[in-house]
Amino acid sequence: MSKEDEQIGAVSAGDLHHHDDQVMRDTEISRIIDVVVGKIGEAFSWLWLVLLAVIIGNVILRYVFSQGMIELEELQWYLYAAAWLVGLSYTFISDGHVRVDVVHDRLSLRARMVLEFLGLTLLFLPFVLFVIIYAIPFVELSWQTNETSTSANGLPARWLIKGCLLFSFVLLLMVGLARLLRVLATLRYGAAPAVGEV
């Protein structure tokens, strides 16, 4: 067993499954980003309750009073899109996303961190930057033309929901950079001390 794996002896193998965050070293910047994105994610998570209320209201109007409202249908889409898009970064910082760990758990901490580094720098961050670069003119055009729904009684301010795409990917860029900083710190200094260690 290598020295770096001995440092994480206090964490059981079951705990390591999907949770390298427990052994990665934090940096000041990564902690700040996680707190900011966590607060934003918690605030946006209330949209799910609002969405549920809108769906129930829409169903009651449609099937009890035979009154469908396009505005409520579009509001459902807006709320769902905003909550889901911002939820991406919130899921990332809580390490709740799906991973394929067929080989991952058999690797040493250093090998896992190298794979994480390669995944972040070659796949995740370039994809996020690509979306941001192409989303800026997409949102800008919608704002400048004051784009509205194409439906007769649809909602105005289509730029608002398109802006959620840009906003969510900026948050993803932040959490990706925070994770990259933690990976680099772990590669340089080893695993974070277990709880109670100095």
Image (cartoon, rainbow, N blue to C red):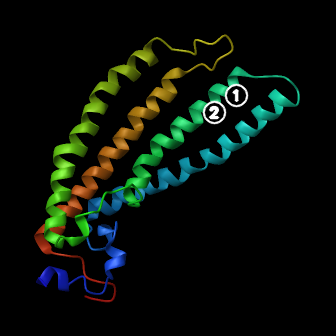
Height in image: 138 above or below 15? above
Q: Is residue 62 left or right of residue 52?
A: right
Q: Nearer the viewer, residue 9 or 134?
A: 9
- Position of 68 with respect to 156 (left or right) is right
| Quarter residue 93 falls in | bottom left
Residue at 27 percent across and 59 percent down: it is: 29
What is the quadrant of the C terminus in the image?
bottom left
State how many labels appear: 2
Q: Is residue 63 left or right of residue 137?
A: right
Identified by mark 2, the residue type is: Gln
Q: Which residue does the numbered mark 2 point to in the structure image?
A: 76
Classify 10 Å Cα crowding around label 2: few (below 14), some (14-19), many (20 and above): many
- The residue wearing badge 1 is 72
* Residue 96 position within the rendered picture, expressed as x and y whole percent measured from the top left: 42, 59
Looking at the rendered structure, the kind of residue marked 1 is Leu
Instruction: Give the crowd class for mark 1: few <14, some 14-19, many >=20 residues within 10 Å.
Output: many
Q: Is residue 25 visible?
A: no
How far across and down, in percent of the image, does residue 116 sit? 20, 58
Q: Is residue 25 left or right of residue 184?
A: right
**Are the residues at dot 2 and dot 1 in contact (C-beta closer than 8 Å)?**
yes
Q: Quadrant of residue 3?
A: bottom left
Q: Where does the image place residue 10, in percent across and percent down from the top left?
A: 30, 87
| Res 108 visible | yes
Towards the viewer: 155 or 118: 118
Quarter assignment of residue 113? bottom left
Point 57% across, 31% down: residue: 78
Give the residue drawn at x 30%, y 44%.
173
Q: Position of residue 136 (x, y in %)?
A: 33, 25
Q: Residue furthest right?
A: 65
Name the element at disc 1.
Answer: helix
The answer to whether residue 67 is above or below residue 183 is above
